[in-house]
Amino acid sequence: MTSFISTQELLALAGDHLWQSTLFAAAALVCAALLKRHSAAVRYWVWFVASAKFLVPIAALVAVGGYSSWRVIEIVPYSEGPVLIEAVSQPFTGEGVALRTPGPRAAADTTIMSWLPAGLLTLWAAGGAFFLLRSLLHWYRIRRIAHDAVPMTAGREVESLRALERRMGFTTPLPLRCTESFLEPGIFGVVHPVLLWPRAIGERLTDEQLQAVLAHELCHLRRRDNLAALFHLVVQTVFWFHPLAWWIGAQLISERERACDEEVIRRGSERETYAESILKTCQFFVESPLACVSGVTGSDLKKRIEEIMTKDTVSTPGALKRALLTVAAVAVFVAPVAVGALNPPPQTRDVAAPATLPAFEEVSVRPNTTTGPGGRGGGGMQPGRYVATNLTLRNILRRAYAAPGSSGPNGGIDLLEQQVAGGPDWVASDKFDVVATTKGPTQGAEMRLMIQRMLAERFKLKAHWEKREMPVYVLTMARPGTLGAGLTKTSDAECAAAKAAAAKAAGSQQMPPMPSGQVQPSPLQQCGSIQFGPGTLIARGAPMEWVAQTLVTVPVITGIDRPVLDRTNLTGNYGFELKFAPAQAANPAPDRAPLHLALEEQLGIKLEATRAPVDVLVIDSVERPAPN
C-alpha cells in the first residue's frame, strides 16, 4: 500500500524504539559492570553498540528481514476472476468517530490531542536544529584554527612523532600543525586527520612527557575515535531529548581515554611521567568542545590519574569471552532481521481511488433504529438501483468488494464476514438503510464500484487490501490423474452444441416444476453454469475454480466457513451431479454422505484443511454518515 505514515503512527513507532533503546542501554550498563576488570577498549565497544542501537530501530531490522525473506508463499490473485473468497481469523481494532457529539471539555481535549503530535514533532525538530547548529559552530571554530595553523616539518615534536609512528607501525605520516591557540593537542578530521599542536606546549613538557602525549594521540588515530565520536554526535543530535544519549556519550569519551591510557602505559611510558604530562596539559590548555576532536584531557581527570598510577594490570578477555561478546553484539542486529525473514510482512495494496469510480445519480443513507440483529447479505442490486435495508456497514462492505462471479446484475461472490477487518465496533452493530439509483441499467460489476464510491464519500471510508495467511480448504485430486466416476470433462464441441441448442429453444420450453429441496438439470442448459440446491450441486461445463467458489457461497448447506482454493490442476470444463447430506439438515437422507466424503467418492476430489495467504479488506478509518 502506498500511503504516508500518519503523525500518530510515527510517534507510536518512535515510542517503541525509545523504550527498546533504553532497555538495551540498561543491558549495556550491566555488561560494562561485568567487564570492569577488563580492558577499557572492551567496555568502549559495549557502549558503542548501545549508541548504534539508537539509530537502528528493531522495527526497521524486522522490515529488512521481511522484505528480503527467502520464504516463497503462493499468493492467490484477487482481482482476476473468477476469484476466491478469503477469511481472516484475527480481527484488528481501529478507531472510529464518537457516537455522541462531544461536550465542551471533550472538544477541548480533542483539540489538544489533534495538535499535540505535530507540536511534539516541531519541538523535536527545533531541538535537533539547535544542537546541530551548535556542533557546526564548534566545528567551524576548530577548522579556522586548523586553517591558520602552520605545518611543522622539523623540531623535536616532529622527530618524536615520526619515531613513534615507526614504532607503532604507521605507514602514512600524520601531518603536524602548530597553532597559536590554547586548545589542547588533538586529532582534527576524519578523512584527512591532522594533529593540532599548540606552540606553547613544547615549553612546558619534557621530552618524555612530550612523547607520552604524542603516543596518546596516535592511539586515538589508530582507534579511529574521531569517526566513532562523529557517529555518536549524530545520535545525540537526533535524540537530544533523551538523557541516555548524553550519558552514553560521556561513557564513550571516558572509556576511549582510558583505553589510550592503557595502551600508552603498555608501550613503556613511565606512569608518573605520563600522569604529569596530562596534568600539565590540563593546567595550561583548554579541552576541545567537540568530542570528535580526540585530545588528552577528556573524562574524569582525577579518576584517570588514579588509575594510571595504581592500576597495575588489565586483564584481557579470553578467546571464548571475546567470541561470546562478538556473537551477542551481532545478534542484537541479526536476530530482528531473522525474525523478519521468518515472518515476512503482509502484502498490501490500495483500493481504487473514489474519483476513478462511477457514481450513483442519487443516494439516500439513513440509520435504521430497529432492535434485533440486522439483515443478512450485502443488499440487493437491481438493474437501476441498489437497496440495502437494515444492514450493518460490514455486510454492505462484503457486497461492495465482492469477488467477480457469475454474470447478471447480482453476479459476484460476497466476501466472508471475517474478510472485513478493522474499524470501530459500530461497523458490525449499527444498521443502515441505503437506496441508491443509477441513470440507467447497470450490471453488478459496475454497481459494486458505485457502492465503493458511495462508501468513500458518505462514510469517509479509507481501506486497503492486505494478504494474511490463515486457514483455508483446498481441492486436490484424491488419486492424481484419475477422475471420479461422476466427473466428466466437457469438450468445446459439446459446449458449442449445447449453446446452440439453448439459443434455438430459448423461450420455447419451460422448466417443469421441481419438488422442494431438489435441483433438476435442464437438458438445454448452456455450458459454464452451476446449479446449487439443498444437498445437490450440478455443474454443466464449469471450470474447477468455479466449483471451489460455489462451495463457499452457501455455508448453511455446505458447512464451509473458510476459503476454498482449487489445487486440482484440472484444466478445461467439467460436468457432474453431486449428491450429499446438507450440513444443517434436520433429517438428512441416510444414503447421502457428508460433503467432503461425497466429493471424494463421487468426483475423486479431496477437500483438505491447510493455511494460505488470502486477501483481507482492512478498514483504516471510517465515519458515521450524515443521514439524508
Image: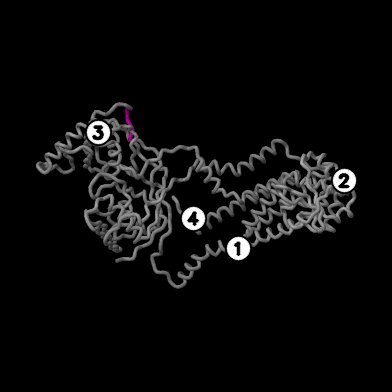
The magenta region covers 475-479
Is the C-beta separation of discs 1 and 4 under 8 Å? no
**Which mark is nearer the camera, 2 or 4?**
4
Q: Which residue is mark 3?
A: 574
Specify which label sits upstream in the sequence, 1 or 2.
Answer: 1
Specify which label sits upstream in the sequence, 3 or 4.
Answer: 4
Is the C-beta separation of discs 1 and 2 under 8 Å? no
Q: Which residue is mark 2?
A: 270
Q: Secondary structure at mark 2?
A: loop
Left or right for 400, reference 276: left
Q: Residue 126, which numbered label?
A: 1
Specify which label sits upstream in the sequence, 1 or 4.
Answer: 4
- Specify whether residue 613 is painted magenta: no
The image shows residue 85 at horizontal and vertical percentages of 33, 44
Quadrant location of residue 361?
Answer: bottom left
Q: Amino acid at mark 4?
A: Ile
Q: Secondary structure at mark 1?
A: helix
Is the C-beta separation of discs 2 and 3 under 8 Å? no
Residue 587 visible here: no
Left or right for 371, reference 175: left
Residue 49, placed above or below residue 287: above
**Which mark is nearer the camera, 1 or 3?**
1
Q: Residue 5, which numbered label?
A: 4
Specify which label sits upstream in the sequence, 2 or 4.
Answer: 4
Give the CA distance from mark 1 to mark 2: 49 Å
Quadrant location of residue 242?
Answer: bottom right
Left or right for 277, reference 457: right
**Which mark is nearer the camera, 1 or 2?**
1
Residue sitting nearer the eye, 160 or 424: 160
Residue at position x 29%, y 34% in the image: 597
The image shows residue 151 at horizontal and vertical percentages of 81, 50
